[in-house]
Amino acid sequence: MRQVDQERHNLHESLAGAVTLTLVLVLLGSVRCCPGVCTCDRNTTDCSALGLISLTPLLPLLDQDSETLYLAQNNLSFLAAVDLANLSSLEILDLSQNHFFTLQSGVFSGLSGLRWLNLSTNFLGRHLATSDVNRSKEAEQNLNRSRGGVSLSKEVFRGLGWLRGLDLSSNGLYWLPTGLLDGLQRLTWLSLARNRLAVLERATFEPLVGLQQLLLAGNPWECNCKLWNFKHWVEWMIYRDGLVDTITCSFPRKLIARNIRNVPAEMFEHCVQSVAKEVTPGGGGIRPLCSPGRISSNDECVRQRYRPVSVRRAQVTQIVAGVVCGTVCVMMVVAATYGCVYASLMARYQRELKKRGPPLMAEGVADDLGDAQSPTTPEEAPPKEACVVYGYRISSF
């Protein structure tokens, strides 16, 4: 009995130790999965409106399997690539309403599975803004370009090949660097609303072959030759069932408050015919328009980008349809010609028959019958009053 009691005692102690260890592991796991200042629900971590200045003390406590991370309404101003390197499972990242003035190249390269990125309401286009409020908008924009451009380098979104939605609204952006969106072929939703964009380059958006919705409202658009190519790209996107909101002109005066999509193409004819010189932003002389095969992009001429696959396929379809239609038209012309010739021959044949008159069949048949039935004696000859019609004798009364 004592041995049995001892074994029961040992078993109870083992069970108690296992339960204690389990509780410790659960507590440690809960601490790592969800920091105390954040709110967590399954794979979602919400650390919004906490006044965070840095992510350094927070990131080690985050679960590496988190799929959604909200960091909106904080005071974050710097983000390094190593900060997000361990969050490879993230699909949604919200960094809106912070104080980001710049983002390093490849800062999101470790988030290969990211689907949605919200960078709205930051200061990504304002760190180079001049303090002189009387400086014209064009001079301020040229100044930003000459000093290196916006704080978004063309490599900032490198590695986000699966990104579907990108929000860059309310950032004070003056322009977008060429190549910024090159690696985002799967992007379907993009917002550039409420910035300071006056001009956009068509080459910047041509890689977005899957884009379905583009938000551009709230920008001071200059509806002149600089926006002409982008206008054509917008019309092409709408043609393939894309959605683009209103692009309201702020310049020139005669087009103020008009939607550029409703401006007739004839008003941009001079953009093609003009061979005027372009003034460089730094004011250091003039340079001619770009050579054939290259297009103007901000301060330099860049090689014209490939046409999207859908456009090339559409052109091939047009060529094939043209060949088929041409073949059908040729066959119809041949058939019509044959019909006309046949009708002409038949008409000529009928005219020939009409000229010949009725057939001389009666006279010939009568002669044959007369020869075959001619009487051997004068008494058997038919009277003279009888008529022979088509070989039959008809007696007169």
Image (spheres, grey):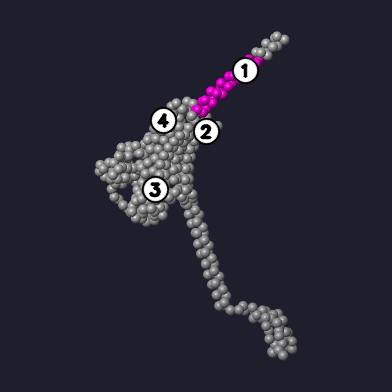
- Image quadrant assignment for residue 153: top left
- Image quadrant assignment for residue 80: top left
Question: Residue at label 2?
Answer: 44
Q: What is the magenta segment's predominant secondary structure?
A: helix
Q: Which mark is residue 28?
A: none
Task: Say if the magenta span includes residue 16.
Answer: yes
- Image quadrant assignment for residue 120: top left
Kindly report which numbered mark, 2 or 1, lies closer to the viewer in this rendering: 1
Q: Disc 2 residue type?
A: Thr
Q: Residues within 10 Å of mark 2 (few under 14, many from 20)?
A: some
- Asked whether 248 or 267 is in front, the reply is 248
Instruction: Tell me which numbered mark, 1 or 3, is placed earlier along the sequence.
Output: 1
Question: Residue at label 3?
Answer: 230
Compared with residue 29, is residue 5 higher up or lower down, i.e. above or below? above
Q: Residues within 10 Å of mark 3 (few under 14, many from 20)?
A: some
Q: Disc 4 residue type?
A: Ile
**What residue do we see at 37% from left, 44% from top?**
196
Mark 3 → mark 2, Cα distance in angstroms: 39 Å
**What residue do we see at 46% from left, 27% from top?**
58
Locate the C terminus by quadrant: bottom right
- Asked whether 344 or 73 is in front, the reply is 73
Mark 1 → mark 3, Cα distance in angstroms: 71 Å
Question: Residue at label 4?
Answer: 53
Q: Secondary structure at mark 1?
A: helix
